[in-house]
Amino acid sequence: MNERNINRSEEYWLAKARAGRIPVHVGIIMDGNGRWAQRRGLKRHEGHRAGVQTINRCLPAVIKLGIRHCTLFVFSTENWKRPQEEIQFLFGLITDYCRKHKDELIEHGVQVIPIGRWKQLPASAVRSIESVVRDTSEGSRLKLYLAINYGGRQEILDAAARLAKRLVSKGQAGFDGITQEDFADCLYTRGIPDPDLIIRTSGEKRISNFLLWQGAYSELVFTDVLWPDFEPVDLYKAVVEYSSRSRRFGDVTDRRG
Ligand code: IPE
Ligand code: IPE
Ligand code: MG
């Protein structure tokens, strides 16, 4: 396929996506970096490096669609099981990304917000994350949540502990009368709308501990495309698919009005 055809196809899917419903919050499980590299006879590292390029390529497309909240699954609480060398490489990439792309993020009006136990990363990574958070705090077009050392179950445990502490400090003995809103207010994602759409690349059809509470009614779109090969057109296609879904939330008709 030549450049012109690619552009035509991209334009077509962008227009189609824009004509439908745009999700307010999109979560992305960026999977398949290792397989992408292995298929090319490269080290897994190269797949992760290429995966960062995909983020750079796709963020403008997220903004173009008018999506206001986007969560990227960067490193899970289970990814500590990987070889030390790969983990250290990933932390290095996170550090570099925050440093090298800060100006671009500011320019595009992106506010970066980390979620998860990211403060457990090496000090240099933590510092670079803190710095990008501080310097992008005025960004108003897109809120970009980076799920780093994030696990849905861990988040729920942390929220339960936080809620219990709140109740104790208020002198409340039991959990009677606690609402879902009270609980959600103790999650890392406090105040953030639940994801309308969760995309997972690489053909795996599972959630892998991503936004467990928040994703209760998310529309799921799975694509075989490996994350380093993911293009804006794939995002537009996923949004078109989302738009065609009937979201009933337990009711008998679409509840989106
Ligand atoms: C996703 O790609 C990146 C992270 C989980 C950090 P993988 O590294 O999981 O790639 P595959 O699934 O092995 O191909
Ligand atoms: C999910 O991918 C985590 C991230 C994308 C950061 P994994 O590759 O870790 O998930 P599993 O092991 O295939 O479930
Ligand atoms: Mg994987």
Image (spheres, rainbow, N blue to C red):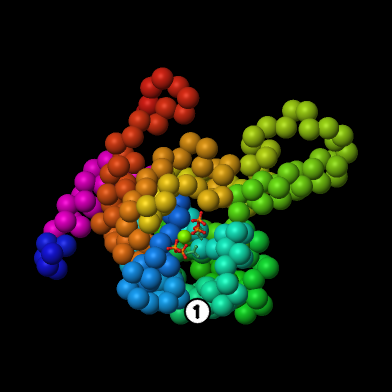
**Kind of residue at badge 1:** Asp
Instruction: Please tell me in which quadrant of the rendered image residue 134 appears.
Output: bottom right
Which residue is tagged 1? Answer: 96
Q: Is residue 184 visible?
A: yes
Farthest residue in the top direction?
Answer: 252
109 to the left or right of 237: right
Q: Within the magenta stretch, is there residue 216?
A: no
Q: Quadrant of the C terminus?
A: top left
Residue 78: where, in percent of width, then height? 60, 59
14 to the left or right of 161: left
Tell me if residue 80 comes above or below residue 253 in the rendering.
below
Specify few, some or many for label 1: CA neighbours under 10 Å numbering under 14, 14-19, or 20 or more: some
Q: Within the magenta stretch, is there residue 22?
A: yes
Point out the stretch of residues depicted in magenta. Answer: 7-23
Give the main secondary structure, helix, strand or loop, of the magenta stretch: helix
Question: Which of these two is toward me, 77 or 10?
Answer: 77
Residue 254: where, in percent of width, then height? 38, 26
Question: Which of these two is toward me, 220 or 27?
Answer: 220
Q: Is residue 64 visible?
A: no
Number of marks drawn: 1
Question: Which of these two is toward me, 22 or 204?
Answer: 204
What's the residue at 29%, 36% (across, down)?
A: 244
Residue 160: where, in percent of width, then height? 73, 44
What's the residue at 20%, 57% (across, down)?
A: 10
Q: Quadrant of the N terminus?
A: bottom left
9 to the left or right of 182: left
Dot 1: element: helix
Question: Which of these two is toward me, 257 or 27?
Answer: 27
What's the residue at 63%, 42% (across, down)?
A: 184
What's the residue at 57%, 59% (across, down)?
A: 76
Residue 102: where, in percent of width, then height? 47, 75
Instruction: Please tell me in which quadrant of the rendered image residue 101 appears.
Output: bottom left
